[in-house]
Amino acid sequence: MTKKRFSAVGFIAAVAIAVSGLVVPSASAADDIVVWADESRGANLKKALAVKSDWVSGYTITVKAFSNFDALKDAFDKATDASGPDIIMGANDWVPTGAKSGKLAPVTLTASQKARFTPGQLFDLTYKGNLYGVPVDVNNVAMIYNTKLVTTAPKTFGEMVAFYKANKASKSLKAGLCVAGGGMSWGAHSIFSALGADAFQFDSRDKIIYNRSFNGTTFGKNVRTYLLDGKKSNGFLPASDAGCKDNFLAGTVPYAIIGNWEWSDYVAKGFTMNLMPVPGVTAGTNGKMFGSVSGALLTTYAAKHGSEAGAKSLLTNFFGSTAGQVLYQKYEGRPPAEKGAALDATVTAAQRGFGAAASLAGIPQIGAFLNSNAGGASYWDSAPAYWTAVLVDGKDAVTEGNKLAAIWRANTSAGKADL
Amino acid sequence: MTSFFTGKVSFAIKLVVVLLVSAVLLTLTQSAFAQKEYFIAGFLAITIFLLILTYLSKISIPLKFFLPGILLLVAFVLSPILYTVTMSTYNYKTGNIVSQGEAIEQVKNRGFEPDANGTSFDIKIGRYEMQEAILVSDTINKAYFISTVNNRIPLNAADLTINEYSVAESAPDFETLSDADMAKADELYSLKRFKYQDEYFIALEGFEVGVVSRQVLEFDEAKDQFKNVITGDIYVNNGRGNYAIAGSPDKYLEPGWRAPIWFENYTKLFTDKRLRGPLVSVFIWTVTFATLSVLTTFALGLILALALNKPIRGRRFYRSILILPYAMPSIMSILIWGGMFNTEFGAINNLLGTQIAWFQSALFAKFAIILVNLWLGFPYFYLISSGALQAIPSELLEAAAIDGANPRQIFRRITMPLLLQILSPLLIASFAFNFNNFNLIYLLTGGGPRAELDGELAGATDILISFTYKIAFGNSIQDLGLASAISLVIFVLVASISMYGLRKSKVLESFE
Amino acid sequence: MNLWLRNNAWRHALVIFVCLFSLFPLYLVVISSFNSTGSLRLDSFIPREFSFANYKMLFTDPTIPYMTWVKNSLIIAGATAVLSVTIGSASAFAFSRLYFKGRKTGIQLLLLVQMFPAILAISAVYVIMERVYTFAPSIGLGTQAGLLLIYLGGAMGVNIWLLKGFVDSIPKELDEAAKIDGASAVQTYWLIFMPLAAPVLAVVALLSFIGTFNEFILARLFLVDMEARTVAVGFQQFIGGPYSDNWGPFVAGSIIASVPIVAIFLSLQKYIVNGLTAGSVKG
């Protein structure tokens, strides 16, 4: 090549290398704690964290909000230490799988820190003896009744059904009790339980019995009595939750199970705090409902990024502290898990109402039992399948009830290994 | 104009562009190398080499046309395929996700337990005698000491500054780390085990708390096993991705790692009764669904094309409406159709005055799927059938008419065969597309209905790919290795059927 | 009159019936978008209320930067379409016109590669882009450029199939004439082929545009920042999560997103019909 060409090429190469400097990375900040959350929690976290600039000295905190909860889970499943977060706001049933797969790292709380939460809440985020995060908000459901339709709180399940039948025509009721929040597996557990089908059995000392399940025949007979008219559904309980919220708000369904995360929608429509657990078949009993916590979970990527101590400090200084939880729930509006925060004056009456209803009849959401599909299907799949089979397809309530009991018993036995 | 593409000017431009791109890629290669991404660095290096070779010389003219395409294909289509094939030979599922080195490290990290009382102290991190150290405050017993990795130095409370919480803030000869330095020191201090007593040490839990623990699991690198120093249990590498106690395979340490198990995932497909049954029934439905989809959309599209083959009034208007389903975003359309099939308030039940539980009955759900796919797909076949009809030379049809053939015969003997010859590649492509039409099944029925209470694994409308997706990304146990194996099997099936169709339609002969 | 009835009445009747079939769901979409409760419940075919609440939400709610999303979608889909067509047409030209060893095997391999079920592809691609991010953050995970590269990965395979037939149908004599004039393959490509192929390429570009516009699975993993999202990802916010069931803005947004696509589609109708089919014609 001629000298001229050579220098021309050299010049171009130099320009090119300069240009390509744009794609060379700058040193990534080693003093950053990355938190992942879904679209609502993420946005509110950012606001809460922005209040103070030094929750953990020497660190900046970055919150990444994904477009929805599924996207968050998807990304977390695929992440590796190159891109993974240090802390993730996840559901409690992520803990067993995350711990097993080496994505979550254990956290050790001091005795005084542990005292800030109930043992049940800590249990929700524990797997095989290790705690993997800090409980942040409580998710539970409760039953609400429309005071314009129903004047007194029902004391038994039968009362609700009787009311529905008596008023179905005159008030053009579309259903008696529907599940507006939590779905036909999680939210509907209180209905299962009220009629005799608890997901797992406790003995008199509140310890779990692993190899026993509910009595499918008793449950099936209750379903026949209260939910069926011969072989068909009597319309009291719809098999799906579609349209439940709309119908309840429109006054065409007197009782509904709602979740604490959407209470504000009901307030906006003028409903007052008449929350209660679902009444059981006999007076004085209730249907048990799941109370679960979502937590701020520590990932194994934090140690890889050299932010482990910082992330742990953030968990205790912000996520697990009274001040942090009060601040965060101010924006998020869910009941806080931390005891001091739960007593704080800014926690609305609504959250307290849910808490009260839940404490009357709450049971922990034990992922090991509910996620296991050793019996052929997990709790999440088999529960709504029961409603479909009996209320829609007209299958026999007792037969299907026994099938369900067998599945749940197998799941519980197998799930014991995962506690 | 032609001269623009020849001669010195064009060569100069080409040289500049190639050099620019190569320079950028070179920098990227260096950065990749620096970050230890050797595969990617190697790929980029090869890319540079190929680019220069292809565009600055005349070695291969065709390569000039499809080099970028091939490179992108290799990077983002071939490598995922290779990844899938590789993973199908691994025990790659929940609990066995990370690499072995990673798993060992994590077991080590979890391999210590707090002491019986859960003792914890308030600490301050800093340096003492040129080493990393922590200033420990036992606020309950009002005892204070400094701990380095090897030493524990008790302190006199009188020498220290103690705050109102009884926490020591500073001590003589102890340099507290400033806030700004704490973040950088995180990694260093987090790994340290500060001396406490006997086998117990203090480990950091955040910057202000230290927890007393002892190591329970120790790793023996030479023997590739873990030992529980308290109970004496030995955990050996079980060859499937976990360290387990020999003789008690149920007692294993977590997390495990992804370990090669070769063809076990494949044999499972044939031997596991729980999988075999659903796989066969899902396969049958997948083939049925793909075939019916192609047939119905093609039939409707063709009929419309025939109907509008004549320039009747309003043809343009009709055509604009007919292609609307194809132009709309399919996610939206599928979800809307899902709402329309709702049992209680769906528009379909409203219209027909029925109460059919569309998605709770296998038969109706399948019908719904075919119907929605028809709605989504017929405009495409209408368009291509229209064009194909127009492409048939009219002289052929006229000649046949003159010879005395009636319209039906003309259609059957001349039009149809020609149409099929023209459209067969697209029909085959449509079959292959629908065989893997994940979006429709996932968004419309979710694969259901499924008799979970009877232990069914697959739903009535599940096709192979949606069934595999549940195995790979379902809620409880995600078995990616098994899903990869199924993917490979699906691939072999689709490829064989499509290749057979292509051979029969003699499309590939155009490439001889 | 009888003749007209016999010949044409059935055509009109059939086509009108199918048009109703086409329009029915779209009519419901439009009605729901004006329904302020944001549900898909449609108990009557005549809308009982007519509210712009959903549309207003899209444009005024600060947590929904809808127009930004539309802009992002247009940019990504547009860039993908243009680049994808360029790659595809060049490859189709080479496979059709140039004779080289392994031509038939090559195209068979391309076809096969496309049929592979891409279930784990997302995991693989995610890992690749994560690693790219470590040394090239502007084209790695989380960037639009990175997503664009991934979309282009499949460009060659998909488009070759659509274009091959068309390229075959261009008479070889044109090529030969050009060769006699001394044109190289590249020159033939740019000067003779491209002008002829413009309509077909426009069609392929449009199909690619629509496909990319609708893609949300990869996009929602990659484009996490609110400002970087595409419309398809943004919609996930409304309908995706376990606690969200907000059909109103989703439907309204879908309509707005569809309008430009439908408009382009309709205006290019003639090209589309010619383009999709010209590929299948054999002389």
Image (spheres, coloured by chain):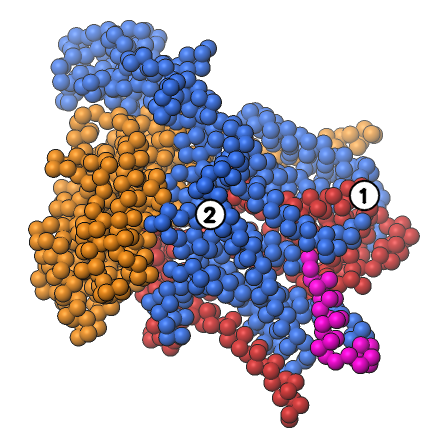
Chain colours: A orange, B blue, C red
Q: Helix, strand, or loop for circle 1? A: loop
Residue B400 coordinates in the image, percent (x, y) = 80, 77
Q: Residue at x 21, y 73 (%)?
A: A172
Chain identity of mark 2: B
Residue B66 coordinates in the image, percent (x, y) = 72, 44
Q: Are marks 1 and 2 in contact (CB under 8 Å)?
A: no
Residue A179 in sight in this render: yes
Residue B412 lies in the magenta-colored region: yes
Q: Residue at x 37, y 47 (%)?
A: B455
Query: What is the C-alpha distance between the residues marked 1 and 2?
Result: 46 Å
Please state if C86 lies on the left or on the right of C121 as rendered: right
Q: Name the disc covering residue A243, or none.
A: none
Q: Looking at this view, is A227 or C277 the one in front?
A: A227
Q: Name the disc covering residue B278, or none.
A: 2
Residue A43 in sight in this render: no
Q: Name the disc covering residue C100, or none.
A: 1
Residue A280 lies in the magenta-colored region: no
